[in-house]
Image (cartoon, rainbow, N blue to C red):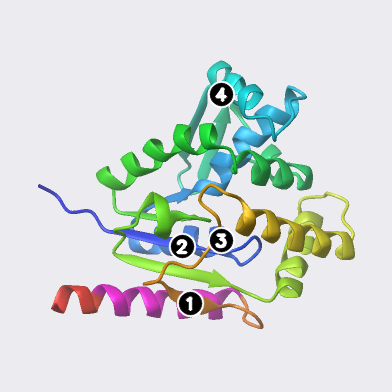
Amino acid sequence: MNHYHSIAIDGPSGAGKSTLARALAQEMGYLYVDTGAIYRTVGLAVHRRGVDPKDPKAVEQVLGQVDITMGHGPDGAQRMYLDGEDVSQAIRQHIISSYASQVAALPPVRAFLLQKQRHLAENHNVIMDGRDIGTVVLPQADVKIFLTADPKARAQRRYLELLERGQQADLEQVLTDVVERDRQDMERAISPLRQAEDAQVVDTTGKDLEESRALLRCVIQSVLSQKEES
């Protein structure tokens, strides 16, 4: 029976989880799973239907009406599809961040996606990022990382990301939204954002992409090496 390695990367919005996880997955030949993008796709579906993202019954009805699938491009980048439409860019709208956080707090949504995520880890070497990967989705992950950064640094990254996508943004508003997203994620009753007890903390404040990538790579290789020796 094959044993596939799983690397769980959790942390708050804007810490660089998706960018770093995608780059390292490509480098290591692992499947990259951006769970945040999956929740964003649910959020987009709810938003398009004008449904209250805090209403469990209404959101559960939406889940029964839509087809959400995931694919990967030639470069390993994850693509999200909603009813056959590639919504990989649409889910990155700033307003969808709030919808994603709210629907992610609902038990029907988490139950709907939990088995999908675990199935991927059972059949591939994966690097999976999100808010509760090391604590709930993959509690037996080979490597657990809690990736974080100062809220101002995370807001700055998010602000530049939005500008690069051609979206209008206000830095102060983005910072306010980042802090509010943190509060929602940490205070939700179901699978709140928290550091797993056996996670390695990696702080990317003040580090550029390559410095952060090198630091993360070093931590992952160190943990995997220790496990192979033991």
- The three-letter code of the residue at mark 4 reads Leu
Which amino acid does the dot numbered 2 rest on? Answer: Ile
Which of the 4 image quarters holds residue 17? Answer: bottom right
Residue stretch in magenta: 209-224
Q: Which residue is drawn at 75% across and 63% down?
A: 179
Residue type of the residue flagged with mark 1: Val
Q: What residue type is labelled 3?
A: Thr
- Between marks 1 and 4, how big is the CA–CA gap? 34 Å
Where does label 2 land, which residue? 9
Residue 201 is marked as 1
Q: Nearer the viewer, mark 3 or mark 2?
A: 2
Q: Position of residue 170 (x, y in %)?
A: 90, 59
In the rendered structure, which disc, 1 or 4, sits on the residue that comes first in sequence? 4
- Provide the secondary structure element on which disc 3 rests: helix
Q: Is residue 128 visible?
A: no
Answer whether residue 4 is magenta in the image: no
**Residue found at the far left of this picture:** 1
Q: Which residue is drawn at 79% across and 57% down?
A: 177
Whole-number angstrom distance, CA of label 1 to CA of label 3: 17 Å
**Crowding at mark 1 (Cα within 10 Å: few <14, some 14-19, many 20+):** some
Q: Which residue lies furthest to the top in this view?
A: 65
Question: Considering only order in the chain, which callout, 4 or 3, is on the residue closer to the N terminus?
Answer: 3
* Secondary-structure class at tag 4: helix
| Quadrant hosting residue 142 | bottom left
In the image, which disc is placed on residue 19? Answer: 3
What residue is pinned by disc 4? Answer: 63
Q: Is residue 53 visible?
A: yes
Q: Earlier in the sequence, mark 1 or mark 3?
A: 3
Percent coordinates x, y for residue 68 in the rendering: 52, 28
Magenta-drawn stretch, dominant element (helix, strand or loop): helix
Q: For the residue carrying disc 2, how many other residues have a C-alpha within 10 Å: few (<14), some (14-19), or many (20+)?
A: many
